[in-house]
Image (tube, grey):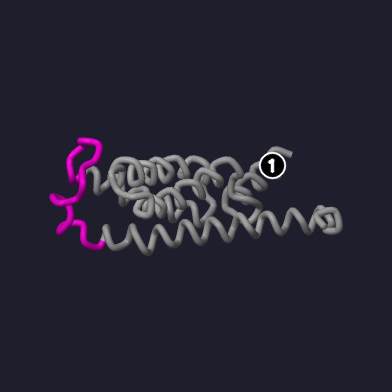
Amino acid sequence: MEHLIPSRLRNTFNDLGLLILRLWFGGAMLFAHGMPKLQTFSEKANLFPDPLGLGSQLSLVLAIGAEVGCALLLMLGLATRLVSVPLVFTMAVAAFVVHGDDPFSKQEFALMYGFAYLGLFFTGPGRFSLDQLISRKKGARHS
């Protein structure tokens, strides 16, 4: 079946798929997990879990940085591979440290996100991204 789809259309489908993944996994992280932490920062600063021994406040700042800052950049497709790293790390800490003693059903959510970010690390953002737009402009400038 794959051979029936012209390569240009197949590439467009792949790029649209990457855009959907970036928007969903970036947006869900940003709005469902990161923004509530940011909005209640002062209330959570001294109570936030400190799984790595960095202190509750710094742990919260790092979580917000990944879940808000990196997720927003991921949605935009800006520095996609770079911002995927802290997202993968944050989800690994959530799955294996914070929920390390919990049943798999508690780890599953963080692992699902983590593997999506890992996949985006390897694939990159696709054509519909700021990374690609910047790359094209740099290429045109150096031509």
Q: Residue at x 13, y 50 (%)?
A: 46
Side of 134 relative to 113 (left or right): right
Viewer-side residue, 78 vs 96:
96
* Residue furthest to the top: 53
The C terminus: image quadrant:
top right
Name which quarter of the figure residue 101 lies in.
Answer: top left
Residue carrying label 1: 139
Residue 94 point in image, percent of width and height: 33, 46
Q: Residue 131 versus residue 62: which sits nearer the camera?
A: 62
Q: Nearer the viewer, residue 121 or 77?
A: 121
Q: Amino acid at mark 1?
A: Gly
Residue at image location 46% in from the left, 52% down from the top:
112
Is residue 51 a member of the stretch shown in magenta? yes
Span colored in magenta: 39-57
Vertical side of 67 occupied by 53: above or below: above
Which quadrant of the figure contains the N terminus?
Answer: bottom right
29 part of magenta stretch: no
Q: Is residue 23 left or right of residue 59?
A: right
Q: Secondary structure at mark 1?
A: helix
Q: Residue at x 42, y 46 (%)?
A: 87
Image x and y of residue 67, in percent: 37, 53
Q: Name the side, left or right, on which 136 lies relative to 97.
A: right
- Residue at the outermost front position: 103
Q: Could you tell me if residue 112 is visible in this image?
A: yes
Question: How far across and how far down the image is residue 9, in percent?
Answer: 78, 59
